[in-house]
Amino acid sequence: MRSLQLLQSNKVGDDPVAVLWHYIRGQMVNWVDGKSGAVHWESTSHRGVQWLDKVKFPRKQKRYIFSPLFDIRYDRAFEEVIRACADLAREGRTWISEPLIRGLIRLHHMGFAHSYEAWHNNQLVGGGFGIQLGCMISCDSLFHRMDNASKAAYGQTLVHLQNCGFKVVDTNGVASHSVNYGEEWLPSWQFQSLIFDCLKETPSLIDSRPCQPLPWEIKLMIPALRVSRKVIRTLPPKSAPKSASDSKLPAAKTADVAYTPTESP
């Protein structure tokens, strides 16, 4: 029964296995009306990715990315990171709903959800979070409380991921702002095939948290998912969006602009 519910529902809930299943399906959370309010899981025609062997840092940004002001850590403050990304004070809206937060926190405890963190003077000043699917990991949102903190967290994490044996980052869309180091669009069928390939490898973000095996419910459903993706692949292809805004995706990452939290961190 639970397996059928996972297959059929696009509701964003707090079941960690359901959240993980939607990521494996290549889906992402977006607003139902595409602008704000209620959210659901949806599929898109294309997905943004960052190949880790194609990372290119602009020369002028390297001093910010590798600034000695920041200490980059992983999985030290996951809940604080995700709640900072969901803070309504940033844009007045968020696709990171409370049920999704609860599900992601549980996925973090299960070893699938990770945070990438920039610290300054022992204070969390920026970072992001994502889900690991074998040698693929996502970067779903970034926040900052100090100029260039998210650039440092994301940029240094890309280097760290490559050194750890990861192959690709799911960036949701292709960013149009400065936090874009070589992202490109993939058709959804190709992105789904990439997920299946990446699940065969098991690198770890940090040694103390090894890559975990998939829950048995998901292992049970993957053969059916493979069949459905073969059918989708026979449909006429759609052209890639010119930008993340054209794709109607929520902003995957937020550039370093002036930001003052409404409360002290």
Image (spheres, grey):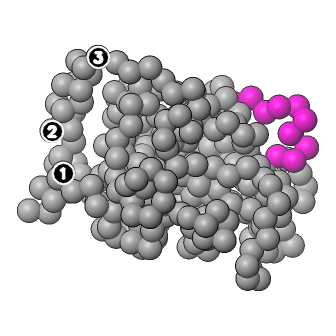
Tag nearer the camera, 3 or 2 = 3
Q: Are marks 3 and 1 in contact (CB under 8 Å)?
A: no
Other residues around mark 3 within 10 Å, as few (<14) / some (14–19) / many (≥20): few
User: Local crowd at mark 2 within 10 Å, few (<14), some, or many (≥20)?
Assistant: few
Residue at 28 percent across and 61 percent down: it is 11
Please identify the quadrant where the C terminus is shown.
Answer: bottom right
- What SS does tag 3 mark? loop
Q: Earlier in the sequence, mark 3 or mark 1?
A: 1
Q: Which mark is residue 7?
A: 1
User: How far is disc 3 from disc 1 in space, using C-alphas?
Assistant: 24 Å
Residue designated by label 2: 224
Residue 139 placement (x, y as % from top left): 57, 49
Please say if the residues under marks 1 and 2 sit with CB atoms less than 8 Å apart: yes
Callout 2: helix, strand or loop? Answer: helix
Q: Name the residue that disc number 3 marks.
A: 236
Q: Amino acid at mark 2?
A: Ala
Secondary structure state at the residue bearing disc 1: helix
| Residue range (magenta) | 55-65
Q: Nearer the viewer, mark 1 or mark 2?
A: 1
Residue type for callout 1? Leu
Task: Give the residue drawn at x 83%, y 31%.
Answer: 58
**Residue 125: in magenta span:** no
The structure residue drawn at horizontal position 74% and vertical position 74%, both measured from the top left corner, is: 261
Task: Please rate how many residues cluster around mark 1, counting C-alpha atoms within 10 Å: few if below 14, some from 14 to 19, many from 20.
Answer: some
| Circle 3: residue type | Pro
Q: Is most of the magenta stretch helix, strand or loop?
A: helix
Q: How much space separates mark 1 and mark 2, taking CA atoms?
A: 10 Å
Instruction: Give the residue furthest to the left.
Output: 1
> Considering depth in this image, is 38 or 151 the residue closer to the camera?
38
- Give whichever of 239, 108 is nearer the camera: 239
